[in-house]
Image (tube, rainbow, N blue to C red):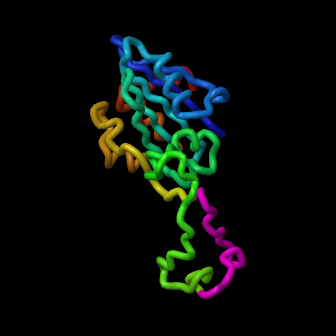
Amino acid sequence: MYFAALLARTEDGWEASDTELDDVETLSDLTDLAREASVDDDTVLVYIEQEDAWFGVVRVDGEEDPRIYVSDAAAAARSSYGEILLTDELLGRDPGDDTVADLDSLDLDGTEDGESENGSEDDEEDGVDPPVKGEIVPPGPIGDREVLVDLGVNEKELLALDSTDALSEIAEVLGAAEVLEAVR
């Protein structure tokens, strides 16, 4: 189950609205959606979560490029909404480059070509899915860990957030808990 919300800063505090992402296909679409919710080009936070799996925060400040943080890139990569956030730039890939080095041929773990660490020829027999070319995504947090620092959530606190209540904790620090709860 997914939940997405927009938190827009205004002169009077924060305004919250839940949002449907059905028509959002790219980060550019998501950024445009955030800018539409902005008052006087002020900060808008887009929050997306997949229950108990991952969450992402996209910060849009006026016409600046969006800043992105994703709590678990590997989990988000398995989600259509997560894929929107995992841009080539965020993943450290060249734009448009769908090729990833053949990890087996690099022999990074000291095994023979095509052999797993336990000596088996086929990782699938051991219940481990082999890497798929073009879909290597690192596990764990990725992106701008300082995306919320000036709003009161430092890097350490952001990394410690649990996917099940991260939005509530962020909203509490922002002073937006009540307006967020009204749309949830």
Counting from the top left corner in percent of width and height, residue 30 is at 53, 29
Instruction: Please identify the quarter of the rendering in which residue 48 is found.
Output: top right
Main SS type for the magenta part?
Answer: loop
As drawn, is 47 to the left or to the right of 155? Answer: right
> Which quarter of the rendered picture does the N terminus lie within?
top right
Counting from the top left corner in percent of width and height, residue 23 is at 65, 26
Which is more toward the observer, 5 or 129? 129
Instruction: Please identify the quarter of the rendering in which residue 42 is found.
Output: top left
In the rendered image of this protein, does residue 13 appear above or below residue 163? above
In the rendered image of this protein, does residue 25 appear above or below residue 138? above
* Residue at image point 44% right, 28% down: 45
Counting from the top left corner in percent of width and height, residue 33 is at 53, 22
In this view, the residue farthest toward the left is 150
Q: How many labels, in total?
A: 0
Residue 63 in view: yes
* Residue at image point 37% right, 43% down: 144
* Residue at image point 49% right, 23% down: 34
As drawn, is 119 to the left or to the right of 63? Answer: right
Which segment did they paint magenta?
119-135
Asked if the magenta segment contains residue 55, the reply would be no
In the rendered image of this protein, does residue 179 appear above or below residue 106? above
Counting from the top left corner in percent of width and height, residue 78 is at 63, 50
Residue 179 in view: no
In the rendered image of this protein, does residue 49 appear above or below residue 18? below
Which is more toward the observer, 53 or 110? 110
* Residue at image point 48% right, 84% down: 110
In this view, the residue farthest toward the right is 125
> Which quarter of the rendered picture does the C terminus lie within?
top right
As drawn, is 14 to the left or to the right of 31? Answer: left
